[in-house]
Amino acid sequence: MLDYENSANPYSERRETIANWKFHATKDISETEEILSCANSLTSRNIKSKDALHIACATELKCEYFITTDMALIKKCSNLKDIRVINPVEFVKTRNL
């Protein structure tokens, strides 16, 4: 998903930065029925399909946080129980407690 979405990024500097982040990943995940089901559930909350797939993958991997700067996405996901969708600043504040 990351590669697909990043390939459509019109900004070369951002595209390169995101591609480099991938090398820091400790896990990789493939599509499953559970992920698709979770993503479909998220799209029913008016979450865009790509965002829903990202969050569904993170949920399947049992991630505690999904970090984004998309404030609309954070609001739409504010009551998810399996993962906390949070902005980078709040994440750093949370981790420094």
Image: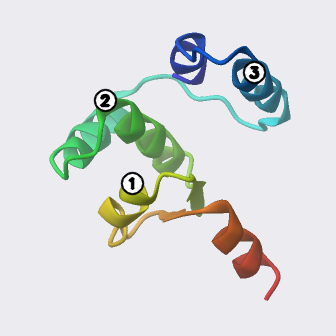
Check contact, mark 2 vs mark 3: CB within 8 A: no
* Of the pair 30 and 95, the residue shown nearer to us: 95
Assign a secondary structure to mark 2: helix
Mark 2: amino acid: Glu
Marks 3/1: CA–CA distance:
22 Å
Dot 1 or dot 2, earlier in sequence:
2
Q: Can you say whether 40 is above or below 9 in the image? A: below
Q: Position of residue 85 (x, y in %)?
A: 49, 62
Mark 1 vs mark 2: in front: 1
Disc 3 marks which residue? 19
The residue lying furthest to the bottom in this view is: 97
Q: Position of residue 39 (x, y in %)?
A: 30, 39
Assign a secondary structure to mark 3: helix
Q: Which mark is residue 73?
A: 1
Q: Position of residue 49 (x, y in %)?
A: 30, 32
Marks 1/2: CA–CA distance:
23 Å
Disc 2 marks which residue? 33
Would you say 20 lies left or right of 30 here?
right
Mark 1: amino acid: Leu
